[in-house]
Amino acid sequence: MKTRREKIIAKAIEILKSDPNGIRYSDLVRKIDREFPEIPVNTIHGVVWNLETQVPNEVYKPARGLFRHVTFKEEEISEKGQKPSLEGEKIKEEDFYKPFANWLVNELEECTKAISLGGNRFRDKWGTPDVMGKREPSRSDIVKAPTEIVSAEIKIDTRDLITAFGQSCSYKLFSHKSYIVVPKNSSQDDISKLDSLCLIFGIGLVLLDNSNVNDPKFEIRVRPLKHEPDMFYVNKYMKLIEKELFG
């Protein structure tokens, strides 16, 4: 007869073998609990929490709180060099600029106006945000806050996440808040690292469905922290888009 611990580990391995993407800790506990209702859930928690150290030849953690079976480890490595197929490359990154600008204004209410930019509008090696917005006080506000500038970098290629993060950091030079927008189908490890970096640097992290321009399903993962940019650069770059953003 197997002990409770052995039953839990065996079932966990069986479940992980059936899911190449891996399973979050809480989901794994729930699945095991459904299989063994007679075993107290606290016992399941006590076994599963460090599963990767108990059976390292069977289980590993590609990201914080995510368990994956080792048979899918090679697959994860090979996927890093592949470019995602987006409906035969019909979908372009620029297609998401306007939807995100609208989302910033209407859904998140982070901006009172937002516009699509991209390209090389700022004409320097530090890059140009894909979307820029402003937040201005309304006439009905009793206490009027100063104007805020918001910038965003959008990437639909999962290989460009490091570049996108670097660009969103540079936008803090002239923005009160900066966002990075990346695909939901990025590896869990990459998203977990971006999550931590965004918390450290005060950058907003948003996930999107890069296969659906009509409904990208933007999802806020980390909210940006407001900071004071360098006003010299704020005015330098805002002059280049003054009519579009402030007109």
Image (spheres, rainbow, N blue to C red):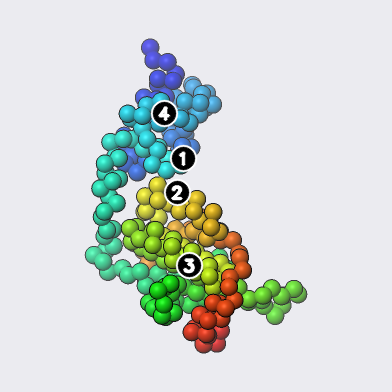
Residue 192 is labelled as: 2
Report, in whole angstroms, how far the alpha carbon at label 1 lies from the one at label 3: 30 Å
Amino acid type shown at disc 1:
Gly
Report the residue marked by disc 1.
Answer: 65
Amino acid tagged 3: Ser
Query: Disc 2, disc 1: CB below 8 Å?
Result: yes
Q: Earlier in the sequence, mark 2 or mark 4?
A: 4
The three-letter code of the residue at mark 4 reads Thr
Of circles 1 and 3, the one toward us is 3
Give the SS element for disc 4.
helix
Q: Earlier in the sequence, mark 4 or mark 3?
A: 4
Q: Which residue is mark 4?
A: 53
For label 3, the residue is 170
Q: CA distance from mark 2 to mark 1?
A: 9 Å
**Closer to the N terminus: mark 2 or mark 1?**
1
Q: Position of residue 37 (x, y in %)?
A: 48, 25
- Alpha carbon separation for disc pair 1 and 4: 14 Å
Considering depth in this image, is 33 or 159 the residue closer to the camera? 159
Quadrant including the N terminus: top left
Can residue 216 be seen at all in this image of the molecule? Answer: no
Quarter where residue 60 is shown: top left
